[in-house]
Image (cartoon, helix red, strand yellow):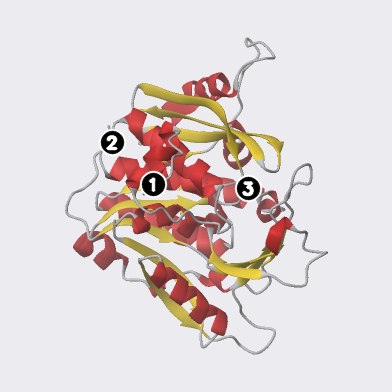
């Protein structure tokens, strides 16, 4: 079992590049819409929202464009989510300078899947640098329960990759648990495979919690697997178990390996499952049918729920159940991040309790 330090100021710390998502209303396409709903978003704060809404202290490490109305919008949103944040104010440098990323995405409907258009030119998050933060103070004096890193930030730029690696090293030095979600994005890796594999390997080598499936291990680390002895109808749970059994000895620090399992029936109906190795104990949830309003952020909520369960000292079985339920519940929100009322609401999802609460 993972040991979380008790004397922390922050239960969870996430480095991130904040941006906004533009979402057409009523599940319409981007092309056919002339009105959009704007929300502040990032994969890492999607994860952190579970803890922040349920009362655990969270800190966000990021950067902002100085005097930008989008930056003000993002800061107000983070405050509303009970998140403390710290970040350098970067001069825009004129109309063609820095800005916060734009993510333009519809929700899909029925047989029409969601489409995501990333617009990240001049993204201010690419400038994240260890020099902008007092990491000794954060990890040594204040204390952090879990540092959560993702492949999105590692792969954003050479600087951010080095930033994430340095964060991981300092966190490990002062007893913080390190969580690493590979979160592979092909467009980020183009012509940078050697550079990024080295960074990802170094971070994975000192991580305590690793989130990713077989494809993530293969694409991010170049890991090769032998599944030849298995039948073609091997289940996703069995495949993940065999994947981890073959490679877990390579990661001496890792205690937890986990992933969600998603099969899309149509845009509004998915099969949703999860599997985890915690120490020597396997836990799994066979895919169950869930309703989907918007799928974006479901995987992040799964990770956030899992980390919350670990921080709260749940049993491995309850950790996975809570993560599964957070992911399922997040898919009923139009925001990329889950906004849970309380733990009871999440456990009601797991228990299938859909009665009206009065």
Sooner in the amino-acid sequence: mark 1 or mark 3: 3
Q: Nearer the viewer, mark 2 or mark 1?
A: 1
Q: Nearer the viewer, mark 3 or mark 2?
A: 2
Q: Residue furthest right?
A: 32
Numbered badge on residue 314: 2
Q: Residue at x 78, y 46 (%)?
A: 112
Residue placed under numbered mark 3 in the picture:
194
Sooner in the amino-acid sequence: mark 2 or mark 1: 2
Quarter placement of the N terminus: top left
Tag 1 secondary structure: loop
List x then y, in percent, for residue 60. 40, 65
- Badge 3 density bin: few <14, some 14–19, many ≥20, Cα 10 Å: few
- Badge 2 density bin: few <14, some 14–19, many ≥20, Cα 10 Å: some
Q: Nearer the viewer, mark 1 or mark 3?
A: 1
Residue placed under numbered mark 1 in the picture:
357
From mark 3 to mark 2, how far is it between C-alphas?
A: 38 Å
Q: Establish if 344 lies above or below 31.
A: above
Sooner in the amino-acid sequence: mark 3 or mark 2: 3
Residue nearest the observer in this picture, 134 or 27: 27
């Amino acid at each position: 079992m993972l040991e979380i330090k008790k004397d922390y100021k922050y239960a969870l710390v996430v480095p991130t590049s904040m941006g906004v998502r533009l979402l057409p209303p009523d599940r319409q396409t981007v092309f056919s819409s002339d009105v959009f709903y704007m929300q502040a978003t990032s994969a890492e704060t999607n994860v952190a929202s579970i803890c922040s809404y349920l009362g655990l202290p969270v800190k966000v490490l990021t950067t902002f464009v100085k005097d930008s109305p989008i930056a003000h919008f993002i800061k107000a949103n983070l405050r509303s989510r009970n998140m403390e944040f710290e970040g350098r104010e970067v001069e825009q440098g004129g109309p063609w300078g820095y800005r916060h990323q734009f993510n333009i995405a519809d929700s899909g409907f029925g047989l029409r899947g969601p489409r995501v258009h990333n617009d990240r030119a001049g993204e201010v998050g690419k400038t994240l640098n260890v020099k902008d933060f007092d990491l000794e103070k954060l990890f040594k004096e204040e204390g952090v329960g879990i540092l959560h890193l993702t492949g999105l930030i590692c792969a954003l730029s050479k600087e951010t990759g080095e930033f994430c690696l340095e964060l991981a090293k300092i966190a490990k030095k002062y007893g913080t648990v390190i969580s690493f979600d590979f979160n592979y994005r092909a467009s980020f890796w183009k012509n940078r495979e050697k550079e990024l594999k080295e960074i990802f390997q170094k971070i994975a080598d000192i991580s305590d919690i690793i989130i990713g499936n077989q494809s993530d291990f293969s694409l991010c680390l170049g890991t090769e697997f032998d599944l030849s002895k298995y039948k073609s109808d091997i289940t996703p749970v069995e495949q993940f178990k065999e994947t981890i059994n073959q490679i877990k000895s390579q990661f001496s620090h890792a205690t937890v390996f986990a992933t969600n399992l998603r099969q899309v029936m149509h845009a509004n109906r998915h099969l949703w499952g999860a599997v985890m190795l915690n120490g020597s104990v396997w836990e799994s949830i066979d895919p169950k049918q869930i309703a989907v309003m918007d799928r974006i952020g479901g995987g992040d909520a799964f990770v956030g729920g899992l980390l919350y369960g670990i921080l709260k000292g749940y049993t491995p079985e309850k950790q996975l159940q809570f993560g599964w339920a957070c992911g399922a519940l997040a898919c009923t929100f139009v925001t990329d991040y889950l906004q849970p009322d309380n733990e009871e609401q999440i456990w009601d999802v797991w228990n299938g309790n859909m009665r009206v609460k009065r």
